Image (cartoon, coloured by chain):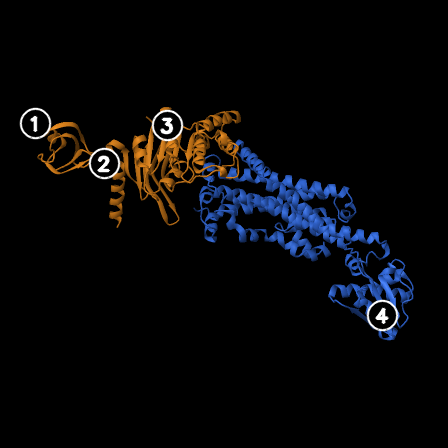
Chain colours: A blue, B orange
Amino acid sequence: MRKMSLVIKHEFITSVTRPSFWLTTVVFPLLIVALSIVPQLLGNQAIKKKSLPDVQNMVTTQMQSLFSKPSGYVDPAHIISSLPSNLPPQWFIRYEDEAQAAADLRAQKIARYYVVAADYLRSGSVTLVTQHDDLLTRTNAQQMFTFVLNYNLLHDESRAVRLTTPLPKMRTETWGAQTGKEVTTTTYALTMGIMTLFLILISMSSGFMLNSVSEEKQSRVMEMLLLRVEPRRLMFGKLIGLGAVALLQLFIWLGSVALVSQSTLSSYLSALDLSPTLFAWVIVYFVLGYIVYATELGVLGTMIPSARESGGLTFLILLPLLIPMWLSSPLLEAPNGTLSLFLSMFPLSAPISMPTRMTLVQVPLWQSLLTAGGLAVTAYLLVLLSTRFFRSDTLLSQQSFSWQRLRNAWRNRG
Amino acid sequence: MEPIVAVSHLRKNFGQVQAVSDVSFAVYPGEIFGLLGPNGAGKTTTIRMMLDIFRPDGGEVTIFGGAMSEGKKSRLGYLPEERGLYKNVKLEPALLYLARLKGLRKAEAQHRLTQWLHRFELFEHRQKKIKALSHGMQQKAQLIAALIHEPDLLVIDEPFAGLDPVNTRLVKEIIKEQRAAGRAIIMSTHQLHQVEALCSRIALINDGRTVLYGEINDIKRQFAGNAVEVVGEGEFGDLEGVRSARRIDGAWHLYLDEHTRPRDLLRQIAQRDELHVQRFEVSYPSLDDIFISVVSQQETAHA
């Protein structure tokens, strides 16, 4: 036990005194925050500055750039008598004839102009004239002008907004689940951010184990260690010591999330259920997920001469963690659907899927417990089986990985 | 006297490859024992079985009077052939960690480490990362790791590799000190002149078997041809019973026929007044000669 505690201490101190540990611990959360939250924040603040609360759902960040220059319109059908009150008047310039609009477009005074057909009420025809055409700009320009036309046809701003975007939010209530939650763009971005954080955290912390084992093999210090500590104790010591490093990293990251929730970003995080209970479950799933993947990668470390040879095999081992990322859309759109339920309860994908699902819906307690139980059993079995690989002959071998060697080690043969 | 370690008919296979087929020897307290053999002979595998790193497929290892246990491992010091330390860790914490894993308390480990670092002139480098140290410094650091817990059995594989003459002399001194302190040392090396200088007994392993085992002098005697070396004045080549004679560096190397023994020759020389002898000795082959002779014979036999 004393030797194991020495290994735990050594692994912990060696890892946390490396500059690379602090670099990744600090840089990754900042990167994720930057990628998922900041664009939302900047976009929404820009809209607020223009005082357009009523059309906030419609006027997106892209729309802001769309009207960096005004648009013109020619309206021989006399449909447009006024602009919606909350739309900046400088966004649209009225032209009496198309030649004048064309001259201003050529002079780059306007970005585009619309020509409403004289028989618009019958034909619904509008021509958009622009110097540069791309799908996104065209779609946004069409949506904005639709809003202007709707307003003038209905003479009611709210109805015009609804007609233009009739279903901006959809609340889903599923029988059997306690609550549903709206999946807005903010929620989506935040959830993806949290998934990415978890993926990075679990794969990185499990990777510590692979690096630690393969480093001791590559530097050939392993033979000296084997005369000092049993392979099994060495493995447990590494698992616990590096687990403590991973927990430290998790606490730093969770602490950052908690700090952010106190700051100006709190309104964005409030879209998610970040309760203390959730934090507790996150720690449980993280620890169990860490044990599962660190054990698997530790076994890989015993079977290869250096971490450089681990590339494809590491990907194969971490694949179950990547699947929820690839299937994030159905997971987010239907957090209580069959696919979400499977991914969040299957032990190898649960460490990422379950915490993600928990941020979106209130998961029944029996599901949380069952998943944690399944993950704990998987972790226990993997640790038990990994002792077959943590043996002197595999730890001292400098041979490359082969399935034959893996099979032999599995069968407990040298 | 009871041996510190005794291996008996050790056998080990790796898959279809037989690494060790029959190795036996015993090592006693206060002796330096040479474990010799060509590359791939099975020395390292034998050492690993002896130290319980590998489990033998057959045979027996008795260490400190019984089977290996975790407690006994703290009484072993080992400098493996495949050297290595934590490249990205500083020298002092790396050696402290290895010392503490051998059961030393922190204060004791620190005290002994400071002494050893001074002795090996590494004290100034103790806060450097190991990868920043020279090959020779790393070699000395590993010797410290093998010695710091004052083991009763020290196994050193190629202890002089990578060392300059000054450090080679230092390591030899330390090995002799360990012997004087009553510890047993097993030294595996290809530098046979060092074996002749330090060891009292050897085992030569070839092709996974012990092919020579015993006192160095006995083995030399066993391999000595019917030859003498004479230094003196006069013509020694025409003595009766001398089959051939050569002069090398002022000494006569006389090869005798099968009916003549060295003492017959000495008697003849004593009866001839024109011959004056300063030195007369039976000529023994060097360990190098014996090593090459045994290994070549076996290779020829296999061929």
Q: In the drawing, what numbered circle is on residue B271?
A: 1
Q: Residues within 10 Å of mark 2 (few under 14, many from 20)?
A: some
**Chain designation of label 2:** B
Query: Disc 4 marks which residue?
Result: A100
Q: Where, quadrant-wise, is the N terminus of chain A in this rendering?
A: top right
Helix, strand or loop for disc 3: helix
Spatial CA distance of label 3 from label 4 is: 103 Å
The one of A95 and A253 positioned closer to us in this rendering? A95
Of mark 3 and mark 2, the one earlier in the sequence is 3
**Chain designation of label 1:** B
Q: Do discs 3 and 2 share a chain?
A: yes
Q: Residue at x 83, y 56 (%)?
A: A56
Query: Disc 3 marks which residue?
Result: B173
Q: Callout 1, which amino acid?
A: Gln
Helix, strand or loop for disc 2: loop
**Chain designation of label 3:** B
Residue A364 relative to residue B150: left or right: right
Q: Callout 2, which amino acid?
A: Pro
Query: Disc 2 marks which residue?
Result: B285
The one of B254 and A217 positioned closer to us in this rendering? B254
